[in-house]
Amino acid sequence: MSFTESEERQALRKAVGELARSYGHEYYLKLARSGGHTTELWNEAGRLGYLGVAVPEEYGGGGAGIGDLAAVCEEFCAAGTPMLLMVVSPAICATVIARYGTDEQKSRWLPRFATGEVRMSFAITEPDAGSNSHRITTTAHRDGGDWILNGRKVFISGVDEAEAVLVVGRTEDAKTGRLKPALFIVPTDAPGFEYRQIEMDLVSADKQFGLFLDDVRLPADALVGSEDAALAQLFAGLNPERIMGASFSLGVARYALDKGVDYARQRSVWGAPIGSHQGLAHPLAQVKIELELAKLMTQKAAALYDSGDDFGAGEAANMAKYAAAEVAIKAVDTAVQVHGGNGLASEYGLGTLLAAVRVGRIAPVSREMVLNFVAQHSLGLPKSY
């Protein structure tokens, strides 16, 4: 394993960073505060091929791995233009369809994922299931050649921008009678499908929604891949989700650290830059160290996933997501403290991040569930839940 990125990925980072900085954090905040979306930036990134770097070449994508897509996500966040739907649409949904979709599903969806033309949300979380995916109650049953889907989902990102939602439901095993997971592509304009925005104390261009599925009738080909392979399909999407979540947090941490360092260099008190004082320099240095460590684990997780080692990637992706979320919180808090009162002034672009980075501890999997995973699978301790 190399600890340095390829020249191609470095060039990709540079190009994406230049595009994102040409829009900038003010562009993002203006849209977030007005209820708008980063449509212009998303569309341009799609036209340039940045959103489709991990889509197979035969469908118009870059044919690269999740590591390259994660680099794209990180650079957007580092420039102050985070797009949460990147974690969902090209990472989870396109990956699952590319690995397990039928030929027709691949031909229909992947070329448009490659260009960013299509946006697809991902729905697994339910109000009564929490982190226990075994308690999902959204169910599908056959009705002739169709599927009928019923259930509820909560905290689903970007549904108002999406053409469809990849919904995790459950079907009945004909042999055992037990419910097993299954993935369905549900158009957002399907009869019986309703979504309502959840009001959040977050300044974000990506909105959260509750979903209500009431006898939603879907054709047979709405089922992704094989009904019997759904569990493998689900985990094929969850590992990229954690890797992308880590990259999202890393990018925000870089943005905050850059802000803090720049201010510490420029702000002078008693005839010297405030960055010359260890009380400010050391916390910034600690953030830099923890950021680089989290980035290495994220790159390891991506390399394992792209090599086909799903179990190894699962361990590393959980660790990367944990470490990146923690350093993002620390980076923003430190940058605000370095700025003093200015850290909460709108002009410095940090105050809105205080709540935003906290999401990384909760989603896409909670910090506590990551610790449960590591305790059980990495340390061999008894299952605690």
Image (cartoon, rainbow, N blue to C red):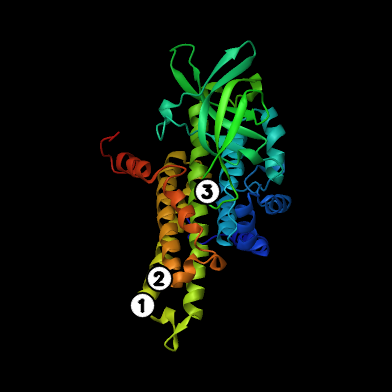
Question: What kind of element bears circle 2?
Answer: helix
The quarter of the picture where the C terminus appears is top left
Label 2 Cα neighbours within 10 Å, binned few <14 / some 14-19 / many ≥20: some
Q: Which residue is mark 2?
A: 285
Residue 11 in view in this figure: no
Q: Which residue is mark 3?
A: 244
Q: Does residue 281 sit above or below 220 in this rendering?
A: below
The one of 197 and 149 positioned closer to us in this rendering: 197
Residue at the (42%, 47%) spot, across then down: 316
Look at label 1 and name its amino acid.
Gln
Residue 291 percent location from the top left of the image: 44, 61
Report, in whole angstroms, how far the alpha carbon at label 2 lies from the one at label 1.
10 Å
* Mark earlier in primary sequence (2, 1): 1
* Mark earlier in primary sequence (1, 3): 3
Report, in whole angstroms, how far the alpha carbon at label 3 lies from the one at label 2.
25 Å
Residue 188 percent location from the top left of the image: 65, 31
Look at label 3 and name its amino acid.
Met
| Nearer mark to the viewer, of 2 and 1 | 1
Residue 163 percent location from the top left of the image: 68, 35
**Residue contact between numbered discs 2 and 1, judged by CB atoms under 8 Å:** no
Label 1 Cα neighbours within 10 Å, binned few <14 / some 14-19 / many ≥20: few
Residue at the (59%, 38%) spot, across then down: 121
Residue 110: image quadrant is: top right
Question: What kind of element bears circle 3?
Answer: helix
Q: Does residue 136 sit above or below 296 in this rendering?
A: above
* Mark earlier in primary sequence (3, 2): 3
Look at label 2 and name its amino acid.
Ala
Q: Which residue is mark 1?
A: 278
The one of 7 and 32 positioned closer to us in this rendering: 32
